[in-house]
Image (tube, helix red, strand yellow):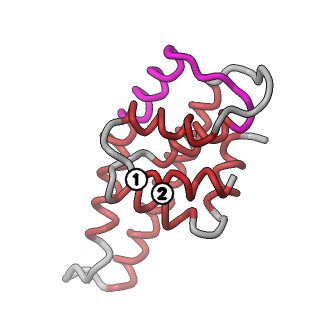
Amino acid sequence: MKAWDFAVELYGREDVAAAALALQNRHRQCISLLLWRLWAAREGRPIGADVLMRALAAAKSLEAEVLGPSRRIRAALKTARPPLGDGPRLAARAAYMASELAAERALIEALESLTPESHGGAEDLFVALDEITRAWGGVTPANLLATLTDAC
């Protein structure tokens, strides 16, 4: 299964979207990076230090330069912004949401291209997710990580 297909399928499962948004909004994690890491672990694709560093650099760059600013603009467009009418404001907000999704897909596909082929069975999903969140930075509640891993 391709990484993007895995990410979309997983995100659609019960409780995953809520946990992912909490990880993103409250704990400043990069959901695309987490979903990619879960995919790689489930597929038995080993992520060495070099791949991990390249993945983190790509995700941090996209978060800082594209996704973060887009989310802030989209949040600002959530409420009335006179003199913009609701129709044009909501259309602009939808366009930002679509561009975020396209950027997230591009990131996951780029990370997949860095990922080695499978060399065996799946890794421990929780350990893989815990490792990537620690490498990203910050403290992440185990229950949110468990929600993601349990859905796999």
* Secondary structure type for disc 1: loop
Q: In this view, does 34 lie to the left or right of 89?
A: right
Which residue is nearer to you in this view: 17 or 133? 133
Most distant residue in the left direction:
82
Q: Please report the bounds of the magenta region as a residue range.
A: 42-61
For the residues bearing labels 1 and 2, Cβ distance under 8 angstroms:
yes
Dividing the picture into quarters, in which one does residue 121 lie? Answer: top right
Residue 76 on image: x %, y %: 26, 69
Residue at 53% over, 38% down:
107
Q: Is residue 50 magenta?
A: yes
- Numbered tag placed on residue 144 in the rendering: 2
Q: In this view, does 26 lie to the left or right of 133?
A: left
Task: Determine whether 30 is above or below 9 in the image.
Answer: above
Q: In this view, does 39 lie to the left or right of 60?
A: right
Residue at 62% over, 40% down:
125
Task: Determine whether 41 is above or below 48 in the image.
Answer: below
Most distant residue in the top direction:
50
Q: Distance between the residues labelled 1 and 2?
A: 6 Å
- Numbered tag placed on residue 54 in the rendering: none
* Secondary structure type for disc 2: helix
Task: Determine whether 67 is above or below 131 in the image.
Answer: below
Q: How many labels does the image show?
A: 2
Q: Which amino acid does label 1 sit on?
A: Pro
Name the quarter where the N terminus is drawn.
Answer: top right
Residue at 56% over, 17% down:
48
Dividing the picture into quarters, in which one does residue 71 lie? Answer: bottom left
Residue 26 on image: x %, y %: 32, 58
Q: Mark 1 points at which residue?
A: 141
Q: Which amino acid does label 2 sit on?
A: Leu
Residue at 51% over, 45% down:
32
Q: How crowded is mark 1: few (under 14 residues within 10 Å), some or many (20 or more)?
A: few
* Dominant secondary-structure state across the stretch colored magenta: helix
